[in-house]
Image (cartoon, grey):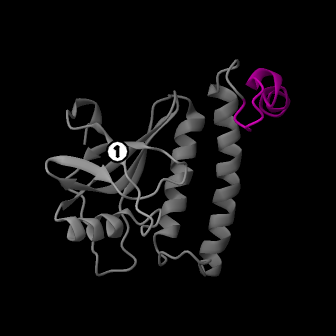
Amino acid sequence: MNIADNDRVQFVDIEPRAKYTPNKCAYNAKDEAETVGGEVVFGRAIFLWDKVMFDLIGHAVVEKDRRYYCVTPSKMGDQKVLFVPDPSIRFDFDNPNSRLPSCEVAISKKPEVQKLLNVREDIRNIKIKYPVSSNGVLLSPADAQALSVLERQQTDLLSRVIYALHPLKAKCACGSAKQFKKCCRPHMQRVYG
């Protein structure tokens, strides 16, 4: 799917309902469509990490009266989601372990970015083997060890990507509200520079 050439990419209003749960968009959209008479539309929510990557997360919205809307509450309080329909996406509502696909696409050619995306893919491949749950997941010892190593690599690579690509005068990624060059960057420069 080439999103750049897709004329169906659009911002969709998020109209959360109190009865719906974050991260359960397929079930939320199905219930809403059955309640109001609309249709479930599968596609991808598009998130941008500026100059780094696109995150394309499987997502479900409702179509009613030729209008898309999302009923799944946003953990970040967003009021809109950038969405592109993808008719190739399937979801098995009868399988409690069913998940919507996600992928990441690098924008930067920095090697740290591709390494980060590879590690995140490896993490997803381990996690997808286990049931979806809001409780802790019991992993096999081998997968638990591999996941621990991958998560440490991910943390290191995230810091390296931030060091390499975060704008110097932008607010620091740590949330301090200081400029990056006056906050975390000097320490990162000592470690990575």
Q: Residue 47 in the image: x percent, y percent?
A: 44, 41
Quadrant where the C terminus lies? top right
Q: Quadrant of residue 116?
A: top right
Q: Residue 68 in the image: x percent, y percent?
A: 24, 48
Q: Residue 61 in the image: x percent, y percent?
A: 29, 55
Q: Residue 183 in the image: x percent, y percent?
A: 82, 28
Badge 1 element: strand
Q: How many marks?
A: 1
Q: Residue furthest left?
A: 65
Type of amino acid at the residue the image marks with label 1: Asp
Q: Nearer the viewer, residue 155 or 85?
A: 85
Magenta part of the protein: which range? 172-193
Q: Nearer the viewer, residue 115 or 1?
A: 1
Residue at (33, 80) in percent of width and height: 95
In this rendering, the answer to whether 9 lies above or below 138 is: above
Q: Quadrant of residue 42?
A: bottom left
The residue pinned by badge 1 equals 13
Quick check: is 191 in the magenta stretch? yes
